[in-house]
Image (cartoon, rainbow, N blue to C red):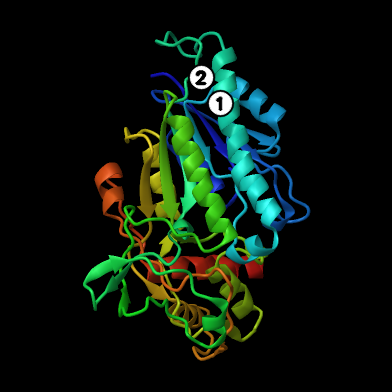
């Protein structure tokens, strides 16, 4: 069987590095895998003294920026990928509201550079890597997998019990949040949060969310006139061992873990009833690996989550218990972040249908694994 060649942008990060490991574990003599990883090793994510990570044999690491046109063009010409997994992005709702240019530059322009380079290199390359193909002057690219976010939904789906219909509420206003009105408001409606399916219209409420939605549009539209197929994953809140404990804009579970281990009292935002769909890193990686060989219609958008809601207060109490701390070592302060959403839970039926995928790690088990890893990091 011909060698599968995969390029992963942002591949040295929390999700990317574990995806590399899983893909290499699946590699064998009958179906070998070669991987190229592009990452800029940003200090916010990797630390100020970050060096090239140690990847297994068969993985080529390239330090660089996804916005570097020359580097991206040369990398594509060298790697000749069958699959591209595009993870390189700035993340964080709160930070995006302050660093608008940075988020648009990396998320939007970086994706544009990559897509344009794919088209340019396809036109320049003469001949395939692994035997004859029908279009010898094209990259052997078959699949483009974009790591997007559930943030594009904004507040997501709610059931209006008054009018008996599903609606997407508008973003919550700062005035309402200051007044302690935390639930979304639709005049004349009584709302109940329900799982959000991929058919719900996007309604981004932060700069970060808007840049992720633009990524989706760019990939769908560029792929519509190309021979490759795009798969777009909208991930929920990904967590697990290996998540940065130093990045202030990382997931809330690792932030809570760091604060608990430092003996701090947790600051619970709003009224503690913010709902999140926490999905474990192993489940996310499994979805990405499956997508590398799945024949999915171009432009398919797929939710990846646990399909269950956990409130921030529930998560905080569970972590406090797992770390052996008093389960009341928190304060509900009413603090909030502009652009945050109230509830998030994914409808994951499409992932089950198209990928034969489902989450295997419960929140309780996942938090236990996260807590054990965090304690080990502190001890070492």
Neighbours of disc 1 within 10 Å: few (<14), some (14-19), many (20+)? many
Instruction: Using residue 349 as the reference point, say whether residue 230 is left or right of it.
Output: right
Q: Nearer the viewer, residue 228 or 358?
A: 228
Residue at (30% x, 43% y) in the render: 355
Instruction: Using residue 162 as the reference point, say whether residue 261 is left or right of it.
Output: right
Which of the labelled discs sits on residue 262, or is there none? none
Q: In which quadrant will I find the N terminus?
A: top left
Quadrant of residue 39 in the image?
top right
Q: Position of residue 170 (x, y in %)?
A: 44, 69
Where is 379 relative to 138, above or below? below
Q: Nearer the viewer, residue 184 or 378?
A: 184
Residue identifier under label 2: 139
Where is 185 relative to 33, above or below? below
Q: Position of residue 188 (x, y in %)?
A: 32, 80
Nearer the observer: mark 2 or 1; the answer is 1
Q: Position of residue 30 (x, y in %)?
A: 38, 23
The CA span between labels 2 and 1 is 8 Å
Q: Position of residue 363 (x, y in %)?
A: 39, 68
Q: In which quadrant will I find the C terminus?
A: bottom right
Which residue lies most toward the front here? Answer: 188
Residue at (50% x, 16% y) in the render: 138
Where is 268 relative to 276, above or below? below
Which of the labelled discs sits on residue 118, or is there none? 1
Instruction: Using residue 378 as the reference point, say whether residue 141 is left or right of it.
Output: left
Residue at (55% x, 70% y) in the render: 252
Where is 370 relative to 226, above or below? below
Which residue lies most toward the right here? Answer: 49
Neighbours of disc 2 within 10 Å: few (<14), some (14-19), many (20+)? many
**Badge 2 or badge 1: first in the primary sequence:** 1
Residue at (59% x, 20% y) in the render: 121
Q: Nearer the viewer, residue 307 or 165?
A: 165
Asked if labels 1 and 2 touch by Cβ distance under 8 angstroms, the answer is yes
């Amino acid at each position: 069987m011909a060698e599968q060649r995969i390029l992963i942008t942002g591949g040295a990060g929390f999700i990317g590095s574990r995806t590399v490991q899983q893909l290499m574990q699946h590699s064998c003599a009958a179906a070998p895998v070669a991987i190229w990883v592009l990452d800029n090793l940003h200090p916010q994510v990797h630390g100020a003294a970050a060096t090239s990570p140690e990847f297994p044999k068969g993985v080529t690491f390239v330090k660089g920026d996804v916005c570097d046109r020359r580097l991206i063009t040369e990398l594509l010409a060298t790697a000749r990928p069958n699959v591209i997994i595009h993870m390189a992005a700035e993340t964080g709702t709160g930070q995006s509201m302050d660093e608008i240019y940075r988020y648009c530059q990396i998320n939007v322009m970086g994706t544009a550079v990559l897509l344009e380079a794919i088209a340019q290199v396809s036109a320049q390359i003469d001949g395939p890597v692994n035997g004859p193909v029908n279009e010898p002057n094209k990259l052997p690219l078959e699949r483009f997998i974009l790591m997007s976010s559930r943030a594009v939904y904004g507040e997501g789906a709610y059931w209006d019990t008054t009018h008996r219909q599903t609606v997407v509420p508008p973003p919550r206003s700062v005035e309402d949040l200051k007044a302690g009105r935390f639930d979304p408001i639709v005049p004349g409606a009584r709302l109940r949060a329900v799982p959000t399916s991929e058919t719900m219209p996007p309604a981004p409420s932060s700069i970060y969310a808007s840049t992720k939605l633009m990524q989706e549009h760019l990939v769908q539209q560029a792929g519509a006139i190309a021979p490759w197929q795009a798969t777009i994953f909208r991930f929920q809140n990904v967590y697990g061992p290996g998540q940065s404990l130093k990045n202030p804009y990382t997931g809330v579970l690792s932030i809570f873990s760091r604060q608990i281990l430092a003996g701090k009292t947790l600051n619970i935002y709003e009224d503690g009833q913010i709902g999140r769909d926490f999905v474990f890193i192993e489940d996310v990686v499994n979805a990405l690996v499956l997508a590398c060989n799945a024949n999915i219609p171009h432009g398919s958008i797929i939710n990846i989550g646990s399909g269950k809601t956990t409130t921030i207060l529930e998560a905080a109490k569970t972590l406090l218990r797992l770390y052996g701390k008093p389960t009341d070592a928190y304060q509900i302060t009413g603090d909030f972040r502009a652009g945050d959403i109230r509830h998030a839970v994914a409808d994951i039926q499409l992932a089950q249908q198209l990928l034969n995928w489902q989450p295997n790690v419960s929140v309780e088990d996942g938090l236990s694994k996260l807590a054990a890893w965090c304690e080990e990091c502190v001890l070492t």
